[in-house]
């Protein structure tokens, strides 16, 4: 069995004090618009429609990219609509991953 590792080139680290350096070799941009229906009496909500637009450059596998984008969106919905956000006394978010909350 062969193991292969990928190392990004051009990443020099980032100096937060000087605000210099590069934290990654590419950036992706996107936006999402969601139409929801909210019951004002109970607070229940339903997602009626979502449009997501992403610019990921030249994709190696569009099916994987679509799955990652849609999965991240659903994870975000779960984080911000279904779960309680818990913070430490210092203000650090403690529930910041799928290990701390359930994905819908």
Image: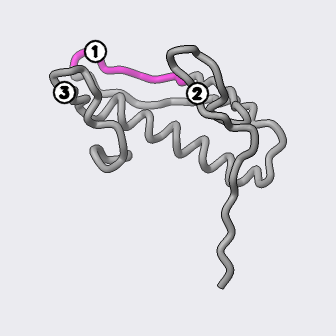
Q: Counting other residues with Cα less than 10 Å from the Cα at mark 2, is it few (<14), some (14-19), or many (20 or more)? A: few
Say whether marks 1 and 2 touch (CB < 8 Å). Answer: no
Label 1, label 2: how many angstroms apart (C-alpha)?
Answer: 45 Å
**Residue under numbered circle 1:** 40
Magenta stretch holds residue 67: no
Write down the quadrant of residue 34 in the picture: top right
Q: Counting other residues with Cα less than 10 Å from the Cα at mark 1, is it few (<14), some (14-19), or many (20 or more)? A: few
Dot 1 falls on a residue whose secondary structure is loop
Q: In the depicted view, which residue is nearer to us: 15 or 26? A: 15
**Residue under numbered circle 3:** 88
- Region in magenta: 34-41
Lower sequence index among marks 1 and 3? 1
Q: In the depicted view, which residue is nearer to us: 24 or 49? A: 24
Query: Residue at 36% across / 47% down in the picture?
Result: 98
Q: Which mark is residue 29?
A: none
Residue 98, above or below 32: below
Q: Position of residue 76 (x, y in %)?
A: 44, 34
Is residue 17 rendered to the left or right of residue 62? left
**Residue under numbered circle 2:** 14
Query: Residue at 77% across / 54% down in the picture?
Result: 61
Q: Main secondary structure of the magenta part?
A: strand
Q: In the depicted view, which residue is nearer to us: 90 or 38? A: 90
Lower sequence index among marks 3 and 2? 2
Q: Position of residue 89 (x, y in %)?
A: 15, 22
């Amino acid at each position: 069995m062969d193991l292969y590792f990928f190392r990004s080139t051009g990443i020099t680290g980032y100096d937060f004090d000087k605000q210099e350096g590069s934290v990654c070799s590419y950036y992706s941009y996107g936006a999402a618009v969601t139409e929801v229906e909210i019951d004002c009496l109970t607070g229940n909500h339903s997602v009626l429609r979502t449009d997501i637009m992403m610019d990921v450059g030249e994709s190696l596998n569009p099916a994987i990219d679509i799955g990652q984008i849609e999965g991240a969106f659903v994870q975000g919905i779960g984080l911000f609509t279904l779960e309680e956000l818990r913070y430490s006394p210092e203000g650090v978010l403690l529930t910041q991953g799928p290990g701390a909350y359930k994905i819908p």
